[in-house]
Image (cartoon, rainbow, N blue to C red):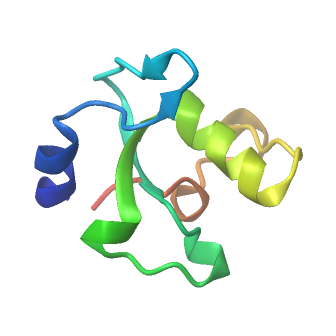
Amino acid sequence: KRAVWTRDGGQCAFVGTDGRCTARGFLELHHVEPFALGGPTTIDNLQLRCRAHNAYEAEMAFGSFVLREEEVGYLPHLTGSGPS
């Protein structure tokens, strides 16, 4: 976690058409190759994402279904973050 935080500069690493996201709070660990699809939990496969961009990446990988925390409870195994 520290290595990913340091490498990404404590900032969301998502890059879109307007450049890199500037979010620095409520960051989550994002698996570039999704863990659910066999992606490893390695420094090279992890990036920091703000909650919105982590959810966006999950939707891109798994489709448009939306799981809301208030509907199903917090699912850290789906978001790539959570208590250590």
**Residue at (12, 55) in percent of width and height:** 2
Q: Quadrant where the N terminus lies?
A: bottom left
Q: Quadrant where the C terminus lies?
A: bottom left
Q: Is residue 46 above or below residue 11?
A: below
4 or 65, nearer to the observer = 4
Q: Tell whether 74 sits left or right of 50.
A: right
Q: Is residue 69 above or below residue 78?
A: above
Q: Tell whether 38 sits left or right of 6.
A: right
**Residue at (68, 50) in percent of width and height:** 58
21 or 26, nearer to the observer = 21
**Residue at (28, 23) in percent of width and height:** 24
Tell me where residue 41 appears, x and y as whole percent. Answer: 38, 75
40 or 82, nearer to the observer = 40
36 or 69, nearer to the observer = 36
Q: So how many labels did they put on this image?
A: 0
Q: Tell whether 8 sits left or right of 44.
A: left
**Residue at (39, 68) in percent of width and height:** 45
Tell me where residue 31 appears, x and y as whole percent. Answer: 48, 62
Q: Tell whether 70 sits left or right of 46.
A: right
Tell me where residue 49 appears, x and y as whole percent. Answer: 43, 39
